[in-house]
Amino acid sequence: MLLVSEVKKHALSVGGDMVGIATADSLSKAPGYKPTDLLPTAKSVIVIGKRALKGFIEPGKGRSVSWGMIYLNHKLNEICYEVSKFIEDRGHKALPVFFIYETFLKPDTPNFNAVITTKWLAYVPAAVQAGLGEVGFNHLLLTPEYGPLVRLTAVLTDAQFTPDPKTKGDLCPGISCNLCAEACPVGAISADGVDRIKCHNYNDAYQEVLGYSYCAMCIKACPVGQ
């Protein structure tokens, strides 16, 4: 019998910094692909996080942000593959949900804000369901350990594990803090949510040069986990 403690221990041993468990059913109403769309027999979602170094984010925007996030995306893909292999070697099916940034999706795509949330598994809602943190005012995952300085990946499996309890949901003070909104250079963050068109338009000007997101001002401004 495969124990969730064994899976978590292995996820940490191959480079993860945090790991939590959600049920596949808990993401049935989340945006994007549902776990069973990708693995029809999925019962559990293993969400793995790796912290971003403060040095990546210190400038707020530029090459260190891009290079740091590119590294984390590749590393997380390796981690979720190794965790999936560990599970399959012990008699269960597992699917690593690799991070693939869809650079071909342009902000002038009709209904961009809606479309961009349907192109991948919703890592942040999955992490919330897995007890790793909560959604901040900037719509990023905030964790007790690292604040928003975390990247995520997920493994789907037909193994049925007991989910982790959710966090209390008291990390982000919301609009009463407003530091992330004030730091955004294009005013993409407000009480109405995050305007992804503004955010992507700002980043896409640099993406072909640097290869990935250029701006992390909202992350740098967040006091949670500092």
Image: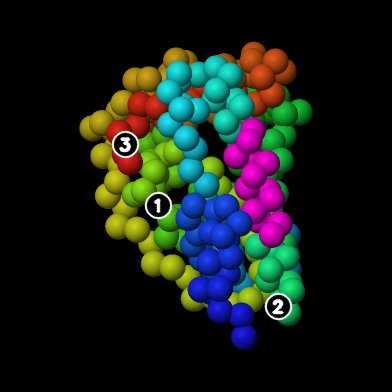
Which of marks 2 and 3 precedes in the sequence? 2
Q: x%, y% of residue 142? A: 39, 44
Label 1: which secondary element: loop
Q: Is residue 36 visible?
A: no
Q: Quadrant of the N terminus?
A: bottom right
Q: Earlier in the sequence, mark 1 or mark 2?
A: 2
Q: Which residue is mark 2?
A: 90
Q: Earlier in the sequence, mark 1 or mark 3?
A: 1
State the residue in front, 127 or 187: 127
Residue drawn at 26 percent across, 31 percent down: 177
Q: Are marks 1 and 3 in contact (CB under 8 Å)?
A: no
4 is within the stretch colored magenta: no
**Residue appearing at x 34%, y 49% in the figure:** 144
> Residue 155 lies in what quarter of the image?
bottom right
Element at label 2:
loop
Q: Residue furthest bottom?
A: 1
**Disc assigned to residue 133:** 1
The residues bearing labels 1 and 3 have C-alpha atoms spaced at a distance of 15 Å
Horizontally, residue 16 falls left or right of residue 71, namely left
Is residue 99 visible in this depiction of the protein? yes
Vertical position of residue 114 compared to residue 40: above or below: above
Type of amino acid at the residue the image marks with label 2: Arg
Which percent across, then down, holds residue 23? 54, 69
Front-most of residues 7 and 197: 7
The one nearer the camera, 17 or 21, is 17
- Position of the C terminus, as image quadrant, is top left
Segment tinted magenta in the rendering: 70-82
Q: Nearer the viewer, residue 207 or 121?
A: 207
Q: Amino acid at mark 3?
A: Gln
